[in-house]
Image: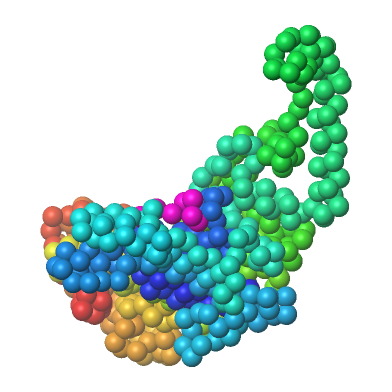
Amino acid sequence: MITKIKIKGYRIHRNFELTPNPSMNLLVGGNDAGKSSLLEAIALGLTGRISGRTASEELNPYWFNTAMVGMFLAEIQTGRSASWPTITIELFLDNKPELQRLCGAHNSAVPTLACPGVKLSVVPNPEYDEELRAWLATPSALLPVEYYKVEWRDFGENELTRRPRELSTAIIDSRTIKASGGVDYHLRQILNDHLEASEKALISLRFREAKAGMSDGALADLNQRLGTLEASLQQQPLKLAMDQTSRTSWETAISPHIDDVPFSLAGQGQQASVKISLAMGRHSDRTKVVMIEEPENHLSHTSLVTLLNRIERLAGEQQQLFISTHSAYVLNRLGLDSLLLINRDSVATITGLDPETVGYYQKLPGFDTLRMALAQKLVLVEGPSDEIVFERIFSDIYGARPMAFGIDVLSMRSLSLARCLELCANLNKPVAVLRDNDGIDPSELRESVNQWLDGEKRQLFIGSVALGRTLEPQLVSHNSEALLRQVLGVADHANLATWMQRKKTEGALRIAESETIITPPLYMAEAAAFIHG
């Protein structure tokens, strides 16, 4: 298993370090946060390949961190000497007996740590020193990667030319279809892990025999005719035969089928499911690291539930999983305690979440915990009407909706306030919580959640009992009846309080759409001021 990941200079990660969980790792983050780049870096370190091709073949100027390249160009344009931008990917591994051949102290750990690991570096090639100096005289925005080299070594400084068998890796990208050539590189690798050496040898033998049989069968008459042609210089007979070279092995000719349909023509969701099941199924002990990009893509809700059930069932201590997702459902089902919140060169983890809270969200996977994780600041309210009214009140006070200030307003929809606050505290999120008093003294209501409140980052706001149990009577207490009837369009003969209680959401929408500004309940105004800062 990977115990530490260090990335310098690769794509968005200028100086990134992560200590992953030993089993499940759920990567979440906003767009351009670096989730895909992290998985690419892990794959490069473990396999020396990307998209089925070697790192040397795929090397391009866009691998290098743009900030590092920009600083380098700025330095040399002012006439100062500067170090060439480089890329380093280090994967520290468990100090287990089967990994000792990868052991050494050639790593960036301080103090130097002798342990198993692999390191991929992209550095200037000294064989091109003259060309590099010439480029420096007239530099361009793109680095001359033609004069760079890729070094892939273990921590003992031994060069690696192919993936060590102890680091078997499965990569499943649910975002794209790899339909060229029947079986993509990663699927072929997964299938190979399911076959014993003797099985591979027998299939290869039978495949060659089948091809050889074509010469004595379907091609015999044609070869007899071709043999009469004087085509070669020495009059040797010309004939057709099946190609028996290694490039035409059974691995490239045989394709999996699903319900008699070739794998490459199956749906994207189906392809991803098959790859995941194969990677995590039989011989899972051989596939040490499994990386899955956005398993929710191309799947209906029912299919996603089936796939997640399968992942949960197959996940064990023998494999380390890295799963990127944009789905709160995936995050909740697979466990919030496995969350890794990625943001370029920083990563936040949850370490103190109560297992019961993890289980709570697993049983209620539809709640949007991902919004809570990604928000800069949060306002938690009880229901949709509170959410709508608060957004309007905030906009009236500060001239723009909360999201313009990085504030997300989220309805808890009858979820446990204590569970929500515990998650916010573990995420270290600034949060203002609004709730009804329900006729109970606010100090009493705070007692059950007080451990999650600090008055600086997290605070609970409750309306006075004397002004009403819920939002609607609080609004009536702070505004004249005539004003509210005008805003809500309630006739004089109708009971205003009754109408507002019966039509909470409709009333909130009319307040939000009205040109008239209402006086906010005091607790809502205080919450807005707190979260705005």
Q: Is residue 10 above or below residue 17?
A: above
- Find residue 481 and report its image quarter: bottom left
Span shown in magenta: 55-62
The residue that appears at 20% across and 69% down in the rendered structure is 75
Q: Is residue 100 visible?
A: yes
Res 385 seen here: no
Identify the main secondary structure in magenta.
helix
In percent of width and height, residue 51 lies at 53, 50
For the point 73% across and 80% down, the residue is: 97
Residue 191 located left or right of residue 441: right
Which of the 4 image quarters holds residue 288?
Answer: bottom right
Nearer to me, 72 or 237: 237
Choose between 274 and 87: the one closer to the eye: 87
Q: Quadrant of the C terminus?
A: bottom left
Q: Is residue 17 above or below residue 284?
A: below
- The residue at 73%/52% (across/down) is 192
